[in-house]
Image (cartoon, rainbow, N blue to C red):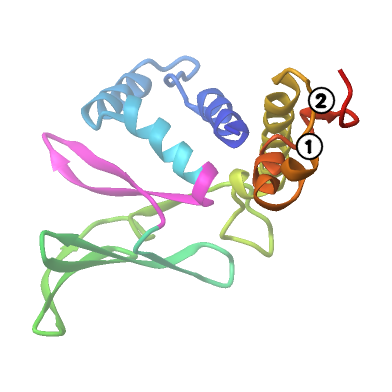
């Protein structure tokens, strides 16, 4: 049954923002909207919310862009490692990814990002990019975060039991429908004993529950 899919789609649609507004200031919302459109966030935000609802977490990464517009990308939890400090803030993030057969890693630290490439089994620094932020340029988006659980919870996992039970119920109803939709048949005449026993047993098993056998010799 597609119950979990329907539940997640409804939540993602309701959580997807449409824009920004700020009382008495039109310049900042207009600037944010330009950044939003330049990074195709109308599509990306919805996909990131879906990932967070299903996989517990999604991540936003901010990098250098063009013409004064930062590059904002969304990523799933695969290949992401996050370390938190004692206050629960993000201390550092490592992201591993592939381009073709080549392996890369980005190490996000406060004030800078270090990019590495794996060559002959060893990681080598390719470049280090400085930025003025006092925290790593990664923002986790966590679904149903708790004080003692910074990894969040999946909406699909909580609905899995209900969905499995519904699937079993629907399957049983379909089987019952097939059985009850067959017309009831009556068997009379000689040779019923041979039909019920011996080689005829498999035939009776095939129609078990859909035949009523009368006494031999009845007309």
Residue count near mark 1 (Cα–Cα under 10 Å), binned few <14, some 14–19, many ≥20: some
Q: Which mark is residue 188?
A: 2
Q: Where residue 73 sits: x, y (%)?
A: 29, 43
Where does the N terminus fall, quadrant-wise?
top right
Instruction: Tell me the quarter of the picture where residue 210 sits.
Output: top right
Q: Which mark is residue 192?
A: 1
> Where is 211 relative to 138, above or below?
above
Specify start and end residues of the magenta stretch as a single range: 53-77
> Where is 53 relative to 18, above or below?
below
In the rendered image, residue 98 lying in the magenta stretch gets the answer no
> Where is 156 relative to 45, above or below?
below
Q: Where residue 154 sits: x, y (%)?
A: 59, 49
In the rendered image, residue 62 lying in the magenta stretch gets the answer yes
Q: Where residue 101 sits: x, y (%)?
A: 11, 65
CB atoms at circles 1 and 2 under 8 Å apart?
A: yes
Instruction: Tell me the quarter of the picture where residue 217 sits.
Output: top right
Decide which of 166, 31 is in the foreground and name it: 166
Residue at (70, 53) in percent of width and height? 198
Residue at (47, 38) in percent of width and height? 50
């Amino acid at each position: 049954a597609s119950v979990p899919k329907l539940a997640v789609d409804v939540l993602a649609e309701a959580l997807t923002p449409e824009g920004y507004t700020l009382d008495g200031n039109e310049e900042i919302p207009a600037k944010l909207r330009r950044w939003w459109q330049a990074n195709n966030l109308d599509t990306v935000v919805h996909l990131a919310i879906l990932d967070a609802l299903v996989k517990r977490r999604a991540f936003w990464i901010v990098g250098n862009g063009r013409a004064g517009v930062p590059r904002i990308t969304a990523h799933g939890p695969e290949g992401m490692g996050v370390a938190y400090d004692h206050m629960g803030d993000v201390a550092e993030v490592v992201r591993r990814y592939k381009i073709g057969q080549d392996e890369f890693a980005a190490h996000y630290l406060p004030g800078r990002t270090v990019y590495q490439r794996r060559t002959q089994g060893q990681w080598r620094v390719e470049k280090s990019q400085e930025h003025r932020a006092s925290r790593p340029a990664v923002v986790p988006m966590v679904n149903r975060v708790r004080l003692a659980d910074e990894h969040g919870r999946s909406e699909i996992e909580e609905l899995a039991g209900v969905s499995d039970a519904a699937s079993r119920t629907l399957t049983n109803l379909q089987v019952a429908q097939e059985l009850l939709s067959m017309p009831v048949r009556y068997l009379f005449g000689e040779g019923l004993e041979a039909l019920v026993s011996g080689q005829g047993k498999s035939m009776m098993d095939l129609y078990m529950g859909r035949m009523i056998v009368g006494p031999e010799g009845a007309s």
